């Protein structure tokens, strides 16, 4: 029986290899708790700037690529969740990932944020993800669950 | 495949009348019911809608489902004469609709997800939404989408 501790769960979907494990964890918890799942993708300004430095693509082309990749991941999460009978909402934002997570969690009155934290990452990516997780944990007004 | 290539004039429904979400979905399903039961398709889409509206905001909804016996991805564009309450994420009624139907096979999933991703990305543009609201014919709808896709 559910005590419905987490009426709304926010899941960060990134279009990365880590997504599936995080999605399955979030969907399982949402099902158990009879929660609504909110899948969020953020088009990361830092990633756009990094890609611009090493790519011949224009900023607009990079944005289009990241937006479509994000939406695809969101629709995949939605399909997995709805197949399990979990009420789901998807949304995409652009900006600084950790800020958008915290702001959307507050705006949508989320009870739990679920983030992925891969075990193995190269140095720079590890620092980026670590910093992001740290900021979300520090600034979120609700519980945060890290999936590894 | 580009969205403008997936859309054909026969699958564009302009200025249909709808008083409810179910009416709107019924109008969209009309052009793709070849050999399968329209009521079943509408009912299955409505069941998915109960688990979360596909109204993505700013007057746009993208109802979608993978189901038998659909054999290839199909997109229907619809515009209704009066905005319809679609339980959208921003609580605004919807006027522009893209119905996406896909097969259930695993190898078709990627194309299905990419199609919805393209539509969602495109519909974030206020320019595109305005052009789709003002277009006077199916050909103009396809042309507006093709212009913004390229």
Image: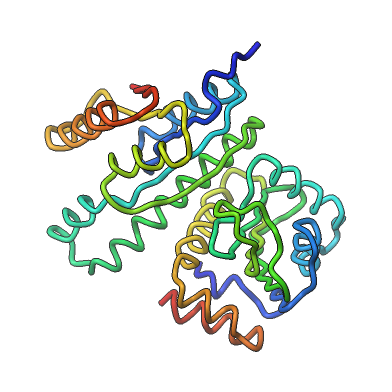
Q: Quadrant of the N terminus of chain A?
A: top right
Between B47 and B106, the one lying in front of the other is: B47
Q: Residue at x 46, y 27 (%)?
A: A111
Which color scheme is applied? rainbow
- Would you place residue A32 above or below residue A17 in this image? above
Q: Quadrant of residue A139?
A: top left
Between residue B95 and residue A54, name the one nearer to us: B95
Quadrant where the C terminus of chain A lies? top left
Seen in the image, is B35 located left or right of residue B45?
Answer: right
- Residue A73: x, y in percent? 45, 45
Please give left or right for residue A123 compared with residue A119 in the image: left
| Number of numbered discs visible in the structure rendering | 0
Measured as percent of width and height from the top left, residue B36 is found at: 85, 56
Asked if A11 appears above or below A94 in the picture, the reply is: above
Q: Residue at x 35, y 48 (%)?
A: A42
Specify the quadrant of the image occupied by residue B148: bottom left
Residue shown at 58% from the left, 41% from the top:
A79
Residue A29 against residue B21 in the figure, above or below: above
């Amino acid at each position: 029986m559910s005590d419905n501790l987490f009426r709304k769960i926010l899941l960060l979907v990134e279009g990365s290899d880590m997504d599936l494990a995080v999605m399955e964890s979030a969907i399982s918890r949402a099902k158990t708790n009879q929660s609504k799942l909110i899948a969020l993708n953020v088009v990361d300004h830092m990633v756009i700037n990094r890609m611009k430095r090493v790519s011949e693509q224009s900023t607009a082309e990079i944005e289009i690529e990241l937006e479509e990749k994000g939406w695809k991941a969101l629709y995949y999460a939605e399909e997995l969740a709805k197949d399990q009978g979990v009420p789901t909402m998807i949304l995409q934002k652009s900006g600084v990932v950790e800020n958008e997570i915290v702001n959307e969690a507050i705006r949508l009155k989320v009870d739990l944020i679920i983030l992925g934290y891969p075990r193995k990452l190269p140095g720079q990516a590890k620092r980026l993800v670590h910093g992001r997780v740290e900021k979300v944990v520090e600034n979120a007004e609700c519980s945060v669950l890290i999936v590894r | 495949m580009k969205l403008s290539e997936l859309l054909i004039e026969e699958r564009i429904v302009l200025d249909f009348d709808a008083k409810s979400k179910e009416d709107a979905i019924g109008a969209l399903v009309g052009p793709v019911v070849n050999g399968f039961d329209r009521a079943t398709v509408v009912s299955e889409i409505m069941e998915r809608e109960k688990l979360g509206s596909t109204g993505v905001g700013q007057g746009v909804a993208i109802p979608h489902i993978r189901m038998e016996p659909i054999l290839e991805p199909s997109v229907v564009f619809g515009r209704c004469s009066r905005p319809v309450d679609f339980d959208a994420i921003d609580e605004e009624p919807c006027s522009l609709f893209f119905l996406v139907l896909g097969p259930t096979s695993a190898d078709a999933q990627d194309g299905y997800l990419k199609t919805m991703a393209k539509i969602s990305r495109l519909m974030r543009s206020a320019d595109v939404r305005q052009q789709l609201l003002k277009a006077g014919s199916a050909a103009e709808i396809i042309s507006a989408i093709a212009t913004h896709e390229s």
